[in-house]
């Protein structure tokens, strides 16, 4: 049984945030998990499957491994108000790095901070960046999509770093140039996958249509980056995100072979294992996107609407803003 004083103190915190991002800690042993904060939904230590109820992602099952035993979830994520999100991020610097899926994640994150719940079914044209362009002396020039959003009421600064056809393999050296300048900031969340494994990349002269060869090369870069970052001993929190899942029936026919969920999940799973082995948490957005079943979730089968990307932001905030271990 969990120490009753610890339980009481944690539940006081939970009530302040209108309850929730935990298994029922006082009965956690019934779920065959050790009863501590790390085994809550907030830890980003699990694959999390769920469903949407209106605009909220509701977890239903978790598992340590994609093929492992699933455990039913009784808790829920906290859904942050603008005030709560800004209080958590007061005076902090957040970086979101990646491709067009991560650009949409950035929009969802800014929506949560601004308290914007309008147009949940809108899929924003990710080529348009509403935040102001900025320049940083330590950012490689190839990162053409560099944006800065500032929340005046909390002095939080949220950056997005990206480029067209952003892939880990082709931008590996530039990432290693950028990251040492920001790894001591408060929070970095990053993903790159699809442009390493999509049709154009696989059919390049480097891989000549060999999907397996492209996967192996990509995963070798994931291993190299996770190992290198571990050695840097970042003081800030670094979170790797999985890539999105797909609505395969909406994908253009020429891309379906490369973006089937079975393949993308396999690659995500192996990449996740490298990051977890290096000691970094992994945000499971594969299953958040999979949970959205409405025809309005995505127009093209891959880029998801504002509701889905706001849900990603709420889950990330549950990790970053959770109470410290007691």
Image: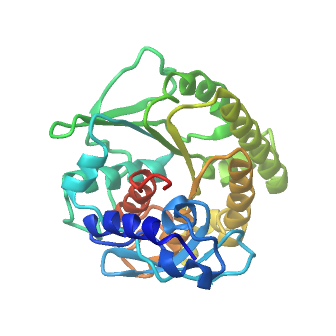
Residue 37: x, y in percent? Answer: 52, 62
In this rendering, the answer to whether 233 lies above or below 52 is above
Residue 32 in view, yes or no: yes
The quadrant in which residue 165 appears is top right
The image quadrant where one finds the N terminus is bottom right
Say which of 190 and 162 sits in front.
190
Name the quadrant containing residue 313: bottom left
Q: Height in image: 268 above or below 141?
A: below
Query: In terms of depth relative to the viewer, which is nearer, 165 or 267?
Result: 267
Between residues 60 and 223, which one lies in front from this camera angle? 60
**Residue 114 horizontal/vertical position (percent):** 20, 52
Q: Is residue 97 visible?
A: no
**On the rendered structure, is 162 left or right of 222?**
left
Q: Residue furthest top?
A: 137
Residue farthest along the left direction in this orientation: 153
The residue depicted at 41 percent of the width and 47 percent of the height is 103
Figure quadrant of residue 116: bottom left
Left/right placement of residue 305 relative to residue 83 reads right
Is residue 9 left or right of 270 when viewed as pictured?
A: left
**Front residue of 202 and 228:** 228
Position above or below: 304 against 91: below
Residue 319 shown left or right of residue 246 in the figure? left
- Residue at image location 78% in from the left, 48% down from the top: 214
Coloring scheme used:
rainbow
Residue 144, horizontal then vertical, whole percent? 44, 29
Residue 22 % position (x, y) = 46, 71
* Residue drawn 40% across the image and 19% down it: 136
């Amino acid at each position: 049984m969990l120490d009753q004083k610890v339980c009481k103190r944690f539940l006081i915190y939970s009530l302040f945030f209108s309850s929730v991002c935990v298994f029922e800690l006082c009965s956690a042993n019934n779920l065959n998990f050790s009863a501590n904060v790390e085994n809550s939904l907030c830890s980003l230590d699990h694959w999390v499957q769920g469903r949407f109820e209106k605009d909220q992602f509701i977890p239903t099952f978790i598992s340590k491994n994609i093929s492992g035993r699933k455990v039913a979830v009784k808790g829920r994520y906290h859904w942050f108000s603008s005030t709560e999100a800004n209080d958590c991020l007061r005076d902090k610097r957040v970086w979101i790095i990646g491709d067009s899926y991560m650009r949409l994640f950035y929009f969802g994150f800014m929506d949560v901070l601004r308290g914007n719940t309008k147009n949940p079914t809108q899929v924003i044209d990710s080529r348009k960046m509403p935040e102001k362009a900025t320049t940083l002396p330590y950012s490689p020039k190839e990162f053409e999509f560099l944006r800065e959003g500032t929340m005046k009421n909390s002095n939080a600064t949220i950056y997005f770093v990206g480029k067209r056809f952003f892939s880990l393999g082709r931008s590996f050296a530039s990432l290693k140039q950028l990251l040492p300048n920001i790894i001591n900031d408060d929070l970095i969340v990053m993903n790159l996958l699809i442009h390493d494994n999509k049709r154009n990349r696989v059919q390049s002269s480097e891989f000549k249509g060999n999907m397996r060869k492209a996967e192996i090369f990509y995963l070798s870069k994931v291993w190299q980056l996770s190992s290198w970052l571990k050695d840097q001993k970042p003081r800030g929190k670094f979170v790797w995100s999985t890539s999105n899942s797909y609505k395969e029936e909406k994908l253009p026919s020429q891309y379906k072979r490369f973006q089937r969920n079975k393949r993308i999940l396999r690659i995500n799973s192996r990449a996740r294992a490298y990051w977890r082995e290096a000691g970094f948490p992994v945000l499971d957005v594969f299953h958040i996107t999979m949970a959205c079943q409405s025809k309005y979730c995505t127009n093209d089968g891959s880029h998801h609407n504002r509701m889905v990307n706001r849900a990603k932001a709420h889950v990330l905030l549950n990790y970053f803003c959770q109470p410290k271990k007691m």
